[in-house]
Image (spheres, grey):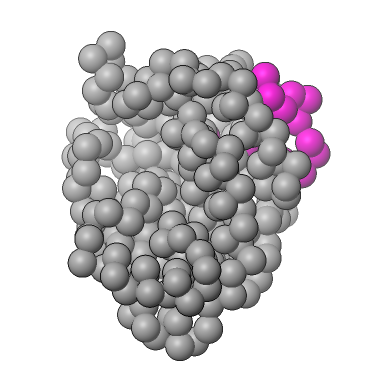
Amino acid sequence: MPSTITIASNSDQPLTVNRLGYGTMRLPGPDVWGEPANRPEALQILRTAVENGVNFLDTADYYGEDVTNRLIREALYPYPSDLVICTKVGATRRPDKSWVPFNTPENLRTSIENNLRTLGQEQIQLVHLRLMGHGAVPLDEQLGAMLEMQREGKILHVGLSNVTREELEAGLQLGNIASVENMYGYAQRTTLAHAHGHNPGGEEVLDLCEKHGIPLIPFFSLLHALPKQLDTIGEVARRHNATPAQINIAWQLHKSPWILPIPGTSSLAHLRENLAAAAIQLSAEDMAYLG
């Protein structure tokens, strides 16, 4: 099981990171809005993650709003030379905490400038274009704007998020796609809907990602989505003296060398559990039992 993964491996500026990242979505307050319930712990989580080898952080300026970007900067700036901070654009938040598209070329430029400012960077290493709005703004217009900002040097690599197989295939025709971020976990291997709307799953794009050498970065890999599967993962967890959440992470790492898990948490104790999951070695029998 490889311990690292390379993003944009077909470019002249690839990014190699350790194969367990950290997603910051759980750091803000309830509904991914407002300041953390425990700000010192949130800052310590970010520092502890990096101190323990995590060098891939996933964020977005619409987490909070701007809460996770500001926390990252406060905790880690000046950034370690090997740290990759990945952000997302294509959405924004309303005061009622709803999630709405923000994906015209002008919107996307505004978001990139905001991320650069709040993170204190001159260039963002990796940006995922999150697709929302059911095609109200054509993919070629959205991705075209991203590729233009890449040519300007504001973005190093462009990825896609929340994409169907057809959208990924279309994106690959338009430019180099460095990574894909879709909902995916042991209990979420098909297209599902959740509080933020319809989300394509990771399973439908994984083979395409593998074929093109594109890391698949799973988000929101909650185990309780399909409770009937918990008995199975629970049995494997007992064999390894681990938690089902840890086995979920280990399953992602063993499923494909092109998967880069980014489990998030607002608890320092849970962060340490997640980090320990990277050391769990699942056997072929374990993987077969998990199905």
Left or right, 233 with respect to 71, comes to: left
For the point 62% across and 34% down, which residue is it?
Answer: 45
Name the side, left or right, on which 57 lies relative to 287: right
Which residue is nearer to you in this view: 29 or 235? 235
Q: Is residue 184 above or below residue 31?
A: below
Q: Residue furthest bottom?
A: 285
Q: Nearer the viewer, residue 22 or 223?
A: 223
Work out whether 213 lies above or below 12: below
Residue plotted at (57% across, 27% down): 42
Please state the horizontal and vertical placement of residue 242, each as a whole percent of the image.
Answer: 51, 64
Task: Answer whether residue 140 is magenta in the image.
Answer: no
Q: Which percent across, then down, holds residue 43? A: 63, 26
Q: Residue furthest top?
A: 95
**Residue 258 position in % (x across, y down):** 53, 66
Q: Is residue 237 above or below residue 218?
A: below
Residue at image point 29% right, 60% down: 188
Give the position of the N terminus as an image quadrant.
Answer: bottom right
Q: In the rendered image of this protein, does residue 34 appear above or below residue 201?
A: above
Q: Residue at x 27, y 26 (%)?
A: 99
Residue 266 percent across, percent down from the top left: 49, 34
Q: Quadrant of the C terminus?
A: bottom left
Count how many numbered circles sit on residues in the image: 0
Asked whether residue 286 appears in the rendered view, the answer is yes
- Is 86 colored magenta in this rendering? yes
Mark yes or no: residue 151 visible.
no
Asked which quadrant contains residue 56, the reply is top right
Q: Which residues are magenta?
A: 74-87
